[in-house]
Image (spheres, helix red, strand yellow):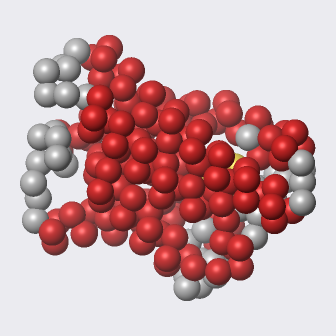
Amino acid sequence: MNSQYVQKSKTTMMALCGLFAALTTVCAWISIPLGFTPVPVNLATLAVFLSGALLGPKFGPISQIVYTLAGAVGIPVFAQFKGGFGVLAGPTGGYIIGYIVASLITGLLIAVLLREGDKSRAVSIGVYVFAMICGLAACYALGTLWFMISTHTGLAASMAMCVIPFLPGDALKIIAATLLARRLKRFL
């Protein structure tokens, strides 16, 4: 494993996974429903990016699995204070499952691409942004595919409802997550 992820006790890492699952919950609750799509605008992907960047490719996804399982059993952790397996089976479920993959890809790319010798600020920022964009693309792919299957909507209409309107906000979340992760990394 990359030396940037300092060995912590299993207890510490599990506590951090719980903390990031809770952070994802709070960020998901900060949401704005849109009239033209069942997918709300929320801040959950900000927490997903941070989990991958700060907890790495192993524990970042674990935090998102904890979040997803908590919602699946009915705890209202999803956007608009929803919970239950029905949310995962519904049109937004693919995006929620995509959080796990996005955290994994973000953490993995940062671990692989940001080597010990790469200390320059430009390289670091570029790696974080690239990793988060790749994670977001995977989340979009899974979520949009499931949206198309569950709603019987074509690709163009699904993109118009579930991807294109969200791109500016997600770009801002990637910028914020990059700045926060680079600052918080030394504390974790």
The residue positioned 74% from the left and 40% from the top of the image is 163
Camera-side residue of 63 and 138: 138
- Quadrant of residue 73 in the image? bottom right
Residue 40 visible in the picture: no
The residue positioned 11% from the left and 48% from the top of the image is 6
- Quadrant of residue 80 in the image? bottom right
| Image spot of residue 107 (x, y percent) | 35, 44
Figure check: 26 above or below 70: above
Q: Residue furthest bottom?
A: 73
Camera-side residue of 67 and 34: 67
The residue positioned 77% from the left and 46% from the top of the image is 162
The residue positioned 80% from the left and 41% from the top of the image is 159
In the rendered structure, the answer to whether residue 103 lies left or right of residue 79 reads left
| Image spot of residue 16 (x, y percent) | 27, 62
In the rendered structure, the answer to whether residue 84 lies left or right of residue 53 reads right
Figure check: 68 above or below 46: below
Figure check: 141 above or below 110: below
| Image spot of residue 92 (x, y percent) | 71, 61
| Image spot of residue 138 (x, y percent) | 57, 44
In the rendered structure, the answer to whether residue 91 lies left or right of residue 131 reads right
Residue 175 visible in the picture: yes
Camera-side residue of 29 and 145: 145
Q: How many marks?
A: 0
- Quadrant of residue 122 in the image? top left
